[in-house]
Amino acid sequence: SFWTMMSSSLRRAWALFALLTATTSPPTTFVHAKKTSVNDATAPPEETAQPPKPTASVDDLTLQIPNVAEDSPPDNGSAALSYDPADLGQDFKHFTAFSSNHTCASDTHALPFNNQIRGVNLGGWMVLEPWITPSLFYQFLGGNETAVAMDHYSFCRVLGPEEGNKQLRRHWESWVTEDILRELKDSGAVNSLRVPVGDFMFQPYGPYVGCTDGALDYLDQLLDWAHSYGFSVLLDVHTQKDSQNGFDNSGQTMGFSWTSGLSTYPRDLTTFQHWPIRSANWMGEFDPAAINYTTIKYDNIQHSLDVIGSLLERYAGHPAVLGVEPVNEPWELTPLDLLKQFYWDAYLMVKEKAPFWKFIMHDSFRFTPETWGGFMKGCPDRALDTHIYQAWMDPASRLTFYNNACAQKKQIALMEREFGPVIVGEWSLATDNCAMWLNGFNDNLPGFPRSPCKYIPCSAPYMGTDQPGTPVDIGKPVQGPYGTGMSGPSFGLCPVDRDWMTERYNRGEGGMSWMSSPPEAPRGRDGTDEVMSMLALKKISAFSGIGHGFYFWNFRTDLYNPQWSYMLALE
């Protein structure tokens, strides 16, 4: 069976890491920090008082607005703010926060980030991603511009609140169950769950209104299950209004255009483009010509802080919650000064209402000391999240992937020294880009996949045979609409990751037989177990000890793709 070593030596290795680095859980009764607004904390004596900055009370859960003109582009530099002598700081239970330069002074009682995470992501549950749960999206194959959904936003828009909510409830019931949590617990290697949640669950807007009713009830249940099985839970706000990265995993694919009018000859096709014009408008309107933001959407940033406030109001006292990640994968062109201010404002809110929560910040695809070194220095319980995948690398020998995995330890060690605690919030065992719809529904990055893919029978729907569009029609080739690349079911077969050949037929670990190997290994020559097991050991070694742990992406997949599914990999 796949990943045999995981069930023996690898499973023991992972479990040993968990045991060696296990720490006691933080207290489940919370002491609220001293309630002082930023203005109250920083105002000098009355006779020398200066005009306050345009800022709001942390208690009001509102945005601290920088002095940036509404129509002026922000500074994308990473220079640290200079210290303001008038900033006397805002006092919390065991530390003082200085908003003038985004640093803290803490006493000996402040809790360090002393957790070692060995976790999995519960992706595709509360935030839909077509590649994870294609059974939900087969119903849109062959549709036109008004009848196709490619993400959570368009799923609700096309189906409407009643039908959308009906299908989502069936999905919520079956994608994550108590039996699955019990199986994760029995694996002996998992101590934490990272749960992607939608901003729309806490502050509904647009087509989400009505469509996602009841989502929080299922999340409540999940947290109770997690507590009963001894898991901590990181609540990861995976979506933002107008998209923080343009990906479908942000809730709404951003940067999108139908091009069917240009596709009438030689056949009348429904076509679109996304990747060449991808955008992200969460923090403002992006100008692709200038590659910069021309205006800032402060209302969107405030919405995101309101989401954190609602999340805190509901879950601040829940014993299973490890902490919060206020935004997942803001793209690399996000204005850095605004992103850091957002992180700072959200951190103060969290420490006000849930002082023992951890605060995790994604690196915005800029995992460098120049970007994050010194940010929030001295502030307790914060960590940097980076996502490390090999699926978008060029095809190469197994040795290349092994060496790349080991090399990650050096960069993690550097960031641990220059910033502080680092968590690898997402990683997988995929070494190619073949997983169906990985780069979007019926789409692909230009030039991807980089090598021919393996095809297997598409899976039966996980939520039952009543799901519209299932099973996949075995009599049809790839159906539209068609993006800039190809990925989709064809005659009942779905693309998944390629097989690796055994070392005997690979001419050593650095052998080049992968260049001519078929995507599905012949009988007796499948070395996928061997390569995946070795790759997992090297990645776990790189992410552990020096760093503060990891969350594997994902806990399961609809299609049989063990490189992306922790549960299938165990099997």
Image: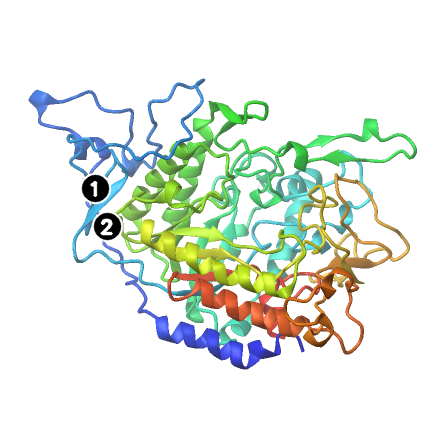
- State if disc 2 and disc 1 touch (CB < 8 Å): yes
Instruction: Please give the name of the residue rendered at 19% of the width and 52% of the height, measured from the top-left corner.
Output: 94
Is 269 rendered above or below residue 21?
above
Instruction: Residue at 25%, 36% (x, y): give it.
Output: 99
Q: Residue at x 70, y 65 (%)?
A: 560
Task: Report the residue that reaches farthest toward the bottom.
Answer: 8
Q: Alpha-carbon neighbours of circle 2 within 10 Å: few (<14), some, or many (≥20)?
A: some
Residue 457 showing in the rendered view: no
Q: Nearer the viewer, residue 326 or 416?
A: 416
Residue 186 image offset from top left, x and y in percent: 51, 77
Quick check: 39 left or right of 347? left
Q: What residue is disc 2 on?
A: 32
**Lateral position of residue 102 relative to residue 306, left or right:** left
Against 323, is 183 above or below?
Answer: below
Compute the Cα span from label 1 to label 2: 8 Å
Q: Is residue 236 visible?
A: yes
Residue 470 or residue 170, whichever sits in front = 470
Total residue callouts: 2
Q: Quadrant of residue 83?
A: top left
Image coordinates for residue 481, horizontal then vertical, percent? 79, 40
The correct choice, above or below, for 138 with respect to 37 in the image is: below
Q: Which mark is residue 35?
A: 1
